[in-house]
């Protein structure tokens, strides 16, 4: 069985740098990036992340169906690093395809509760695929539940889905680290 390490924390807490430090102990690393460069600021963030990574790491950009990417590696990695779960959730939440049926499941999504269930089903599948993959996996996610209650329904829906997804993945993980000000605190 694979060893799953889950790294979470707030924005700019050092999650990615910490996870990348753990990953540097492996020879054959596949980095799955879930971000989409939809504006200049995000393009700059992506470029900054790319520049930090060792050149021998293979990067796969996959905003959707991360479970399929992991299972499709067929043993071609010692470690898979997935950065990040909250962007993955955002991609599914905002996707026209998710809301019209094809990204997550083969059914029409008609309300936020159904959409939440479909997205969390995708997170469950990802956790299971990671567990069964045969190689170690590091998952990175934002902890978004420590702030004020968002002022709009979509933001509250995102916060709730991210919180449940983090619980699911922490449950699958062998180790869980919470990042605060660049300091890793092992909580599991």
Image: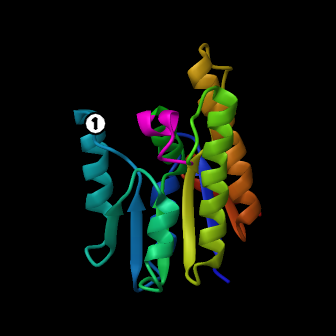
> Which residue is most to the front?
107
The magenta segment is 95-105
Graded by Cα atoms within 10 Å as few (under 14), some (14 to 19) or many (20 or more), the crowding at tag 1 reads few
96 in the magenta segment = yes
The residue labelled by disc 1 is 38
At 61% from the left edge and 13% from the top edge, which residue is drawn? 151
51 in the magenta segment = no
Element under disc 1: loop
Tell me the colour scheme of the image: rainbow
Whole-percent x, y for residue 156 in the image: 64, 24
Whether residue 91 is visible to the viewer of this picture, yes or no, is yes
Whole-percent x, y for residue 165 in the image: 67, 48
Lateral position of residue 72 relative to residue 169, left or right? left
At 31% from the left edge and 62% from the top edge, which residue is drawn? 52
Residue 132 higher or lower than 114, as above or below: below
At 25% from the left edge and 33% from the top edge, which residue is drawn? 39
Residue 150 higher or lower than 36, as above or below: above
Q: Nearer the viewer, residue 157 or 99?
A: 99
Give the quarter of the figure containing the N terminus: bottom right
Whole-percent x, y for residue 62 in the image: 38, 56
At 64% from the left edge and 78% from the top edge, which residue is drawn? 132
Lateral position of residue 186 relative to residue 97, left or right? right
């Amino acid at each position: 069985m694979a060893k799953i390490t889950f790294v979470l924390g707030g924005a700019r807490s050092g999650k990615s740098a910490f996870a990348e430090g753990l990953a540097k102990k492996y020879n054959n690393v596949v980095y799955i990036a879930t971000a989409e460069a939809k504006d200049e600021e995000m393009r700059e963030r992506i470029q900054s992340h790319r520049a930090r990574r060792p050149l021998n790491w293979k990067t796969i950009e996959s905003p959707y169906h991360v479970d399929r990417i992991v299972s499709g590696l067929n043993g071609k990695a010692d470690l898979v690093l997935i950065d990040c779960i909250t962007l993955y959730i955002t991609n599914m939440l905002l996707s026209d395809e998710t809301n019209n049926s094809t990204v997550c499941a083969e059914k029409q999504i008609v309300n936020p509760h159904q959409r939440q269930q479909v997205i969390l089903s995708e997170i469950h599948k990802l956790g299971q695929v990671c567990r069964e993959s045969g190689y170690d996996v590091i998952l990175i996610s934002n902890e978004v539940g420590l702030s004020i209650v968002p002022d709009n329904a979509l933001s509250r829906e995102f916060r709730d889905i991210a919180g449940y997804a983090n619980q699911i993945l922490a449950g699958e993980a062998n180790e869980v680290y919470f990042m605060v000000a660049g300091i890793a605190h092992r909580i599991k």
